Amino acid sequence: MKKTTLKDIATHFGVSISTVSKAINDSHEISSELKLKIQDFAQEVHYRPNHIALSLLKKSTKTIGVIVPNILNYFFTQVFYGIEQKANSRGYGIISCISDESLQKERQTVDLLSSGTVDGIIMSLSEETQAKKDLTHLQDLIENQIPMVMFDRVTDQLDCDKIVVDDFEAGYKTTKYLVETGCKKIAVISSISNSSVGKLRVAGYQKALKEANITFEDRLLVKVGKKDDLQVLIALLIANNDVDGIIALDEITAVDTLNILKLKGVQVPDEIAVVGFTNGRLSKYVSPSLTMVSQHGKYIGELAADILIDRIEHDGLMPFTTKTVKTTLITRESTKNIP
Amino acid sequence: MKKTTLKDIATHFGVSISTVSKAINDSHEISSELKLKIQDFAQEVHYRPNHIALSLLKKSTKTIGVIVPNILNYFFTQVFYGIEQKANSRGYGIISCISDESLQKERQTVDLLSSGTVDGIIMSLSEETQAKKDLTHLQDLIENQIPMVMFDRVTDQLDCDKIVVDDFEAGYKTTKYLVETGCKKIAVISSISNSSVGKLRVAGYQKALKEANITFEDRLLVKVGKKDDLQVLIALLIANNDVDGIIALDEITAVDTLNILKLKGVQVPDEIAVVGFTNGRLSKYVSPSLTMVSQHGKYIGELAADILIDRIEHDGLMPFTTKTVKTTLITRESTKNIP
DNA sequence: TTGAAAGCGCTAACAA
DNA sequence: TTGTTAGCGCTTTCAA
């Protein structure tokens, strides 16, 4: 038993297709008697209007495309969740793509989405895209007038709505907090040193240092690559026995750092305080539990969906906006209290 | 500048639409001269065939629907990732829905997907659906001949391909392992006691007990609900000072249990060993690191996608199969070694 | 080598 | 109150 169409119903009743269409859409043009019969029958055979046909006709698919670089990252999972929730509540489905931090896959994905499949796109740039600064695929998108909102990993090169985390302020705030709790030598461990996000956090960190009259030292800015051994880098970092605070720019690094410190017999937070970014599931379960910067992923997702759908529906020659979402510092056991 | 269509190109060259179509599809029917001109132009204006129109024509959307109960659960995230990867590599997009453990949302979602949007569906039942045993929405799906593969939380009531984790064996294996490391009083803490999955794990646990000549005690089977206080339940459980092993049926509960035990000054694993289900990110970062049962989420996702796409493409009156994926016990510090 | 026409499933303007 | 027609963008016979 294949999908029932209007035509099937029409022939069944010996009426025209448009009559059935109208009946099913409860049009006043149809006699209530016929309408009832048709509606009952439609129910019976589980008639569902073909979404594809409607999309073609209306030139609107009621779905939005979402491209995230990495779904296993809790922040992105949260954003994704927020988007799904909000989109759904506003009657949109979402087709989701994971760029896997790869430019090539991002391109392929954009290609797929730009062929009429979605009414708009929400995305965050892949690492590779940010590194290589190749945005042609996205420029095409914008030329083609496909509404897009970018979040978190955005770029100035593109004209569209954006939502960014206030990473500068987050870096600033975090550093300032550490300073206030008495830290004098604060290091940063970054696994994302060539992303816009990473740079902003470091800039905020530097500003806070300056305000506290602490001179920035290059050796305190630790960049870890995929194949670097964090353990070695940290050993090096704390060899002088002077570092008393560490800011890790992602959750895993934060937890790793914590464990390495514990392993080395360093007291956290008394000897070294630790703060991490992304308030995921790990942070509150380790001990000592980690003070973290929450980026409010779910909220960002909801916001992105709202902005995109607003633009799709009321269209809009509204100017593009960039919303900045402030982070929240969630203090736990890995930092000392402000005296 | 809106989307270019075949018609636009046709009028631009003063030829017919079908000519353009053929030219773009590199048909031999068209003179290579014209073909080249058209292809070049198409390139220039970024022509992309409208995916929706093609779907309507071909009655195939090249996308599959995925319904997971809860994306914030690491196991599901992993499965999701596996599906995305595999589907993508086979030329399919995925439209994703989160049922949020709610029957109503699952129904709504199935509704959306069954209107021609997808060529097939991969899903895991929501908690509520399993509890209420209301499967009418899914029966409709199957009647409508929409290929579906269920994973993890499946049901006997539905005739389709299935992938299950060997939860019985996992429960058995885990318990047996604890017994072999010397545990005599093994408790189970279950947050999913009315799911098929939970029941199977407990059954495996009971079998292992029996084989070890340990009588099953009801008080050792702790069911925790959403609003129960785990701390109280555990206090109660270990009041007798005889429990020496705990199996937690999900990751969060495992970590919580571990922390509560540590808080109470219980030595893990010496006094009480702890094993948890779902080898997510938490387990290896807590200390002592947790021995966990890995369900191979990503693999399950890939498998599901493969099975579904095979069925979609070679169609198939092939009989439905149920694949069972064995779990792996990843031993870490929270359990003792087998002597 | 090119084009006309039909049709995928549906809606909407217009006729009857 | 019902039906006819055109058309969304595309492919595919079949005819020219």
Image (cartoon, coloured by chain):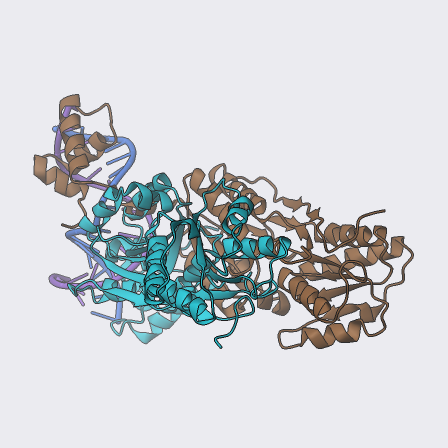
Chain colours: A cyan, B brown, C purple, D blue
Q: Which residue is located at x 22 percent, y 31 percent?
A: B22
> Which x, y percent locates residue A108?
34, 41
Is A318 located above or below residue B159 in the figure? below
Q: Is residue A231 left or right of residue A249?
A: right
> Can see residue A319?
yes
Is B6 located above or below residue A82 in the figure? above
> Residue A36 or C13: which is nearer the viewer?
C13
> Which x, y percent locates residue A134?
27, 41
> Residue A216 or A50: which is nearer the viewer?
A216
Q: Is residue B66 left or right of residue B40?
A: right
> Can see residue B147?
no
Q: Is residue B263 left or right of residue B147?
A: right
Q: Which residue is located at x 19 percent, y 53 percent?
A: A145
> Which x, y percent locates residue A91?
36, 66
Q: On the image, which quarter does residue B260 sit in?
A: bottom right
> Residue B43 or B31: which is nearer the viewer?
B43
Q: Which residue is located at x 85 percent, y 73 percent?
A: B240
> Which x, y percent locates residue D7?
17, 51
Q: On the image, which quarter does residue A31 sit in?
A: bottom left
Question: Residue most toward the right?
Answer: B213
Numbered-mark total: 0
